[in-house]
Image: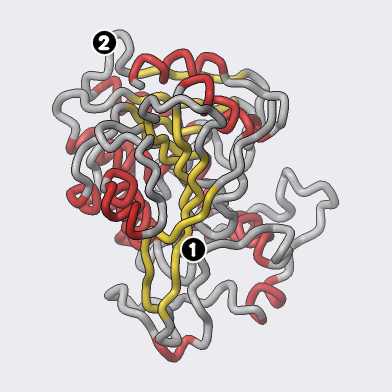
Amino acid sequence: MSQPTPQTYTYKTFVNTDGSTTPIPVDVYLPESTSSAPLTPLIWVHTGGFLQGTRKFVPPHLLRALSRHGLALIAPDFRLCPQVSIREVLEDVSDCIVWTLDPASRAASGCDSARISSERYILGGSSAGGWPALLLGLSLHQHATRIPRPPAAVFAIYAITTVTPELAPFFYEPLRPLPWAADGKLIEESPLKAEGHLTKCLDASHGVVDASGVKVRTDAPPAANPVRAALYNFARQEGSYASLILQSPEEASEVCTPSLIEKKVKTPGPPVLIAYGDSDPKVPHSQSLHVVQALERAGYTQPGSLRVIAVEGADHLFDMEPHVEVDDMWEWLSQFL
């Protein structure tokens, strides 16, 4: 089966550090079908730890699911850390959701497909991308107030969900060498620093620092920038990941998914699917288990409200392999389309 070809649009712009207006693109994949039936948008947030990556790195099984389940895949880029923080990432993702649900905004960007439904949507993400899906989909963060309606379902695959020292101490522990490094060599700081990849472009109040000399990026494909591609591994090597995505350590509690669920979720909201591999060194599956436990304590105990898929022996990015299907995931999601 051939893969659908995306159309690229601009869902928002922002003023970069040099004063230029910078567009943020989104790819829209429609199934190859002549049917006029409405398509449920599935908004998917990409991998890369918020530090690197691109909307183009889509799990193949997501693309295969479009025609099977009547979906339109919406894959946005967003501003990358550490030039900005996770707060700006959440702002961008929420703006993409608003854009997706507003036919006038889509049409103004050139996306005038009447097949994309504005009545319901699925929100999901992989690795770090699962974090905004949970924070926004479950209305745990202030940026969720700008979204017109909650998703029909939320999914998070091998997700990062918190960087608090209490629940994620491994993000603060240097790993030298990285257990998953094939050659055992340390990643040098100097190339990353020389190219500005470690430079923060916001001040303590999240205002743009014009004198930073570094522009904010909205994507960083590994093949196009191999230096940037080492940034997440460098952060884990140095135990500095949290400092690269937060403006201050105090902000960790504002995005601690398990704690926010326990604090804010009084009755179950959108159904949630959590999937992970139990042999993942890059994002330990405790990140997923903390969320599952918090959801269960918040009342996600009714059949269908919470689906957990634990893949025995699976590593990070296990579903990026071309042949991999996650049948249980699609069987569960199909009931909300």
Identify the image quadrant of residue 306: top left
Image location (x, y in percent) of residue 162: 40, 45
Q: Residue at x 39, y 30 (%)?
A: 39
Image quarter of the N terminus = top right
The percent coordinates of residue 38 (x first, y second) are 36, 28
Asked if one can make out residue 253 in the rendered structure from this viewpoint, the answer is: no
- Asked if residue 160 is positioned above or below residue 267 in the image, the reply reads below
- Badge 2 is on which residue? 302
Circle 1 SS class: loop
**What's the residue at 56%, 15% (across, down)?**
327
Q: Residue at x 31, y 59 (%)?
A: 251
Q: In this image, 261 relative to 15: left or right?
A: left
Q: In the structure shown, which secondary structural element does the residue marked by tag 2 occupy?
A: loop
Q: Residues within 10 Å of mark 2 (few under 14, many from 20)?
A: few
Residue 212 against residue 161 in the figure, above or below: below
Q: How is the image coloured?
A: secondary structure
- Rendered image: mark on residue 80: 1
Return the residue found at the far top. 303
Residue 70 figure quarter: top left
Q: Is residue 151 above or below residue 53?
A: above
Residue 226 appears at what percent x and percent y?
73, 63
Left or right, 78 with respect to 204, comes to right
Question: How far, Cα to Cα, is label 1 from label 2?
Answer: 37 Å
Q: Nearer the viewer, residue 39 or 20?
A: 39
Instruction: Tell me which amino acid carries mark 2.
Output: Gln
